[in-house]
Image (cartoon, rainbow, N blue to C red):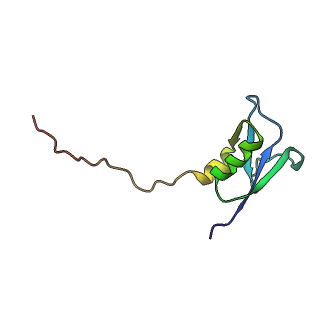
Amino acid sequence: MNKGIYYYVTISTDQDNYHYLHRKECKRMPDKEDMVFIGTLYNLNQALSIARINFKKVKPCIKCCIRYSAPVMRETVRPVLHFPQKSL
């Protein structure tokens, strides 16, 4: 079973008027006075959906959200040729 993660959104915005979404253990998270707890959620997409209900422009923190949600590619993908190649 997946374990829920505590997510927070900053009240203040950056220069482009974006709020930042953070996980509980983020080292870049500002003081608690500038944060709003949005819930215990299971993935980044859920957290972004909830955050965007209350805040118009939200982007995930690069250090705590993007790092854990990016897929891990272990193999290189090779294209499959479905039609034989004509030799000239």
Expressed as whole percent of the image width and height from the top left, the position of residue 12 reads 83, 37
Residue drawn 56% across and 50% down? 70
Left or right: 10 in relation to 68: right
Expressed as whole percent of the image width and height from the top left, the position of residue 80 reads 27, 49
Can you name the residue that lies furthest to the bottom here?
1
Residue drawn 67% across and 66% down? 3
Can you name the residue that lies furthest to the front here?
53
Left or right: 64 in relation to 79: right
Can you name the residue that lies furthest to the left here?
88
Expressed as whole percent of the image width and height from the top left, the position of residue 45 reads 63, 50
Q: Which corner quadrant of the image does residue 75 belong to?
A: bottom left
For the N terminus, the quadrant is bottom right
The answer to which of 71 and 74 lies nearer the viewer is 71
Can you name the residue that lies furthest to the right here?
33
For the C terminus, the quadrant is top left
Residue drawn 59% across and 52% down? 69
Left or right: 43 in relation to 9: left
Seen in the picture, residue 29 relative to 14 is either above or below; the reply is below
Expressed as whole percent of the image width and height from the top left, the position of residue 83 reads 19, 45
Count numbered badges in the picture: 0
Residue drawn 63% across and 67% down? 2
Seen in the picture, residue 11 relative to 67 is either above or below; the reply is above
Seen in the picture, residue 79 relative to 25 is either above or below; the reply is above
Left or right: 41 in relation to 81: right
